[in-house]
Structure formats: C-alpha cells, structure tokens
C-alpha cells in the first residue's frame, strides 16, 4: 500500500498568505532536490489571517522530510 502523509507548516498574521506561498516554493524545491516522487505541495487558507503550507509525500519519504524541515504537524491523506 502506498500511503501518503501531508506535512504542514502554519503561518499567522498579515503576511501569512505570502509567507505560506513562499514556503511552498521551497518545499517543492526540496522535494525535487531529493528526488521525491509523487509529492504535492501547496497552500491552504484557514481564515484571512491564517494560512498553511504543505507537502504531501509517500510514507517512505516522511522521515527524510520531517527531520530536514521540521513541520508543525502531519496527517494521513485519504486516497
């Protein structure tokens, strides 16, 4: 089974949207640099002052990303 995990970074404040978008760019760069297949990165709005950046990776890559980038939290992704 190829389970995926969504690793999440939260950003709060007036610049939260821009910061989350910028962070998502670096998440994508990291995944490409480490040759992680099947990743997805992006941002989501929680409210007008809170955004998150995320990267979804196959379970076998979770430790690599977690240890290098230290997300605030993670969750399993439903297929």
Image (cartoon, rainbow, N blue to C red):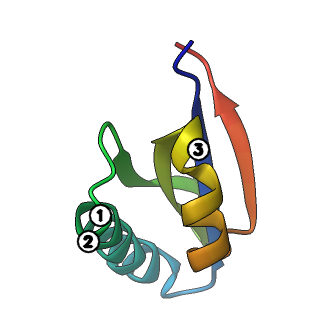
Q: In whole angstroms, how far apart are the C-alphas of marks 3 and 1?
A: 13 Å
Q: Secondary structure at mark 3?
A: strand
- To which quarter of the image does residue 67 belong? bottom right
Q: Earlier in the sequence, mark 3 or mark 1?
A: 3
Q: How many marks?
A: 3
Residue 70: x %, y % from top left: 67, 75
Q: In whole angstroms, how far apart are the C-alphas of marks 2 and 3?
A: 16 Å
**Contact? badges 2 and 1 (CB < 8 Å):** yes
Residue 69: x %, y % from top left: 57, 76
Q: Secondary structure at mark 1?
A: helix
Disc 3: which residue:
6
Residue located 56% across and 63% down the image = 64
Disc 1: which residue:
28
Q: Secondary structure at mark 2?
A: helix
Residue located 26% across and 57% down the image = 35
Q: Quadrant of the N terminus?
A: top right
Q: Is residue 1 above or below residue 55?
A: above
Q: Is residue 14 above or below residue 54?
A: below
Q: Earlier in the sequence, mark 2 or mark 3?
A: 3
Residue located 69% across and 31% down the image = 76
Disc 2: which residue:
29
Packing grade of label 2 (10 A; few <14, some 14-19, many >=20) is few
- To which quarter of the image does residue 39 belong? top left
Residue 57 is marked as none
Residue located 65% across and 57% down the image = 63
Q: Is residue 73 above or below residue 68?
A: above
Residue 61: x %, y % from top left: 52, 49
**Contact? badges 3 and 1 (CB < 8 Å):** no
**Front residue of this view, candidates 18 and 1:** 1
């Amino acid at each position: 089974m190829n389970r995926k995990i969504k690793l999440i970074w939260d950003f709060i404040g007036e610049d939260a949207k821009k910061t989350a978008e910028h962070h998502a760019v670096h998440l994508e760069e990291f995944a490409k640099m480490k040759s992680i297949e099947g990743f997805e990165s992006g941002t989501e709005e929680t409210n007008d002052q809170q955004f998150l950046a995320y990267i979804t990776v196959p379970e076998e890559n979770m430790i690599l990303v977690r240890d290098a980038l230290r997300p605030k939290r993670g969750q399993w992704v439903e297929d």
